[in-house]
Every structure is written in C-alpha cells, then in structure tokens.
Amino acid sequence: MLLLKNARVVDYTTVTDKIQDILINAGEIIKISENIEAEANKVIDCAGLVAIPGLFDMHVHARDPGQTHKENLLTCAEAAAAGGVTGFLCMPNTEPVIDSVETINYITEKAKDCKVKIHVSCAITEKQEGKTLCDFAALAKAGAVAITDDGRPVKSAQLMGEAIIKGDDLKLAVISHCEDLSIACGGAMNAGLVSIQLGVRGIHRSSENIMTSREIDLARDLYGKVHIAHVSTKEACAKIRAAKEEGVGVTCETAPHYFALTEEALRTRDADYRMNPPLRLQADVDAIIEAIADKTIDCIITDHAPHSPEEKADFRSAPNGVIGLETSLAATLTFLYHTGKIDLFDVVRLMCVNPRRILGIDGGKLEVGEAADITLFNPDEEWLVEPEKFKSKSRNSCFKGMKLKGRVKYTIVDGEVVYED
Ligand code: DOR
Ligand code: ZN
C-alpha cells in the first residue's frame, strides 16, 4: 500500500480542490479523504504539492522503430515519467511507418517494459504516402486508438473524408496534421518579416488555415469527427471556435511553444526553435491563449519530436521538431497558470481529461476505483531548463535556458512511483 499524505488534490471530473490523503493498493486508488490512517509500506509527505490525475500527451514521436538514435520507447517513457506524463499516444511516422499489425505488435510488446502507458496511432495511408488507405479494422483490432498521417497531411480530400467515416465506425480518433504542402513545402520558419530579414524560406500561415477549413468542412458534411493537431495560428483558432459553435465534430490541441514563443526566437538561427507548424506572431500567441481559456482548444500536447544534436546543427538543413515531455507541465504552469489565464482545473481538463476522452481511453480522474496514475508537483518551485539533464535521448528543447515555475516531484503509474525528483 502507498499513502500520499496532505496533497492538494485537484480533480476536474469530481470538482475537487482540497487537502487530502490518497491511499493506493494493488495499483488502484482505494480511499481519498482527510487523515487516512493505514499500515502502508510507503508514505509520501505531499505537503505543498498538488496531486492531479497523471498527464496524458496525445502527440508524441517516440521514433521507435527505426530512428532510435533520436529516442526509443524506453527513453521516451523515461522522459514522460520525468515530465509527469503517465500515458502517451505515439505518432506513426516511424521507420517503418506504423501501418501494419506487425509494427503495432512490436510497440505494444516493447511498451510492456516501459514506465508509462503507451498507446498507438497508426497511419491513415499506407507508408503515409497519401495513396491507399490502411486496413483500419485490422489496425483497430491490434490496438490502435487513432489514425493520422502526422508529419504529413493527407493531400486528397476524398481519402481524408473516407478516413473520417471509417474512423467513426471503428471508434478511432482521426487526427489531422493541417498543412497544404503546395504552400508550405520546405520552409524553415513562419513566413513573415523575420524570415524575410533572415533570408530564410517561410511556411505561410495560409497553409495551416486552408487545411483546417477543409477538415472542418469534411467533418460537417460527413457528420463525422476530426481532431486538429498542433494549432498555431489565430485564424485556425477562429475557424475552430466558429465550427464548434455550429456543432461540427471538431476538437483540437496546441503545444506549449505556441503559447510561449514567437518567430522572434528564430533570429538566433538556432534549429532548436524550428518545428512544423512554426512559431508565429505575438497576435497568434495571444489568440492561442484566448482559445485555451475559452475551451476552443481542448488539449495541450507536446509534439515531442526528438532529433539528434548533429541533425539540428545546421539551421537550414535541420529537420523540424522540438522535444517537450519534460517541460510541458512546467511551461503550462508558467505561461498560463501563473499568469492567471487558466486555473488548475483547466490544467487537468487540458492535459489529463480531454486527451483521454478524445481517444476513448480510461482514466484522467482521481476517484476510488480508478487506476492510481497520479502526478505530484510543486506549483511554485522554479527551475532552470538544462536539456543535458533530460531523460530524453535528444536535447532539442526550445525552452532551454529558461526558468520555469512548477516542478514535477513524483510520477505514479498503477500505484508505482516511476519518477521521483
Ligand atoms: O515539427 C515537427 N516534427 N512537426 C511534425 O509534424 C513532425 C515532427 C517530427 O516527426 O519530427
Ligand atoms: Zn504534425
């Protein structure tokens, strides 16, 4: 038995915010109340700490199979645990692409040795080539919970429409990486003043906006559901807000870098600030924060995208992507909670409840009978982001050198402490 003493228990579903003890047995929460007396084998003094349901990150590139010099499932799970993330969804742009039962089996087998719960999304089209739809029924049967060609858009609206219908039938979340490649192709940063001044090819905001409109139109016409990945523009926020008001089945996510940083960071010509979609303008940051606060944006994810220092060395040729598992909660607390834009219930809704709901995965609640997946953090502890200390294999953090406020102290999965600061 594990006993957590005097934690500030914050739970969105049960609308709880009070100092309580949590008693855990055989991986399950068996009691939550004040002053629990029990013969536990381990007691954690949680005075000053907040206890929330374990975070779930629905957008993680674990790079396994195939690109394990960047990350593998084990190191990715270590990084997740260090960030308070007790479960994540891995993206299918691996080598080979996750488009077969065999590759799903490889991941689910390896996931058994990992510290956190790993779920799989598989590709929409075979090899993510945009030509032939995958056999979704077989992939769902093998355990996939979502379909996406993330990293690439599905160019054909007809194929995307079919995927939305089939995904709905099979209860698979359909996730769209919104990018019109005819506009975006090959850019290194946001197309704007800074890219012009630096002489760097830009990625136009219309690339994301056009595709966001298409997905909303498809979801509306087909009475289907679509989840928009990594929203970065103010126009996309406005389109999604209007679609939701109309009752269209659209949900969406953003990542901490889109509410914390702008294209100004690219003036350093440091490829650790390169990702796709790119960092945009202050007006976009403001719109993203507004959309998070008014529930237009459903989830905060990381888009954890490890790349090696060698690959990131040259600004122009570097691949896009930043890691985020070990900074997502701290960045959310720093830029949204400590600034008064959202409260702790919102943090739980955005990072614990909604991602699981969208994917149809259990958990995200602190209640008797639930699996004991719990994140304990000190909301006020400040720390310096030093990527060389990360559990991730990669170092490409765009929060490096920043002081963040809020630190994960313990991560608990099925009643086991998998990370302790
Ligand atoms: O910046 C990105 N990196 N965006 C994506 O969509 C893919 C990801 C990756 O896999 O590196
Ligand atoms: Zn993407």
Image (cartoon, helix red, strand yellow):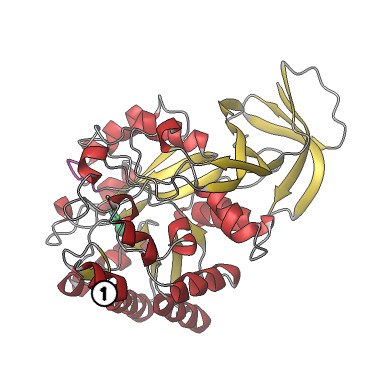
What kind of residue is marked 1? Answer: His
**Image quarter of residue 128:** bottom left
Between 97 and 280, the one lying in front of the other is 280
Q: In this view, does 86 lie to the left or right of 321?
A: right
Q: Where is residue 221 in the image (x, y as percent from the top left)?
A: 34, 81
Q: Position of residue 134 (x, y in %)?
A: 20, 54
Name the residue at 76% across, 51% down: 16
Between 363 and 196, the one lying in front of the other is 196
Q: Is residue 14 magenta?
A: no
**Image quarter of residue 201:** bottom left
Image height check: is 411 above or below 227? above
Q: Main secondary structure of the magenta part?
A: loop
Q: In this view, does 63 lie to the left or right of 347?
A: left
| Element at label 1 | loop
Which quadrant of the picture is home to ligand 2?
Answer: bottom left
| Quadrant of the rendering where the N terminus is positioned | top right
| Residue that carries the numbered disc 1 in the rendered image | 204
Disc 1, ligand 1: is the CB inside 8 Å? no
| Quadrant of the rendering where the C terminus is positioned | top right
Q: Position of residue 218 (x, y in %)?
A: 31, 77
Residue 208 visible in the shown view: yes
Q: In this view, does 360 lie to the left or right of 194?
A: right
**Image quarter of residue 94:** top left
Q: Where is residue 412 in the image (x, y as percent from the top left)?
A: 59, 31
**Magenta segment boundaries in residue numbering:** 93-98
Name the residue at 41% across, 72% down: 281
Q: Is residue 167 left or right of residue 379?
A: left
Between 177 and 161, the one lying in front of the other is 177
Image height check: is 190 above or below 395? below
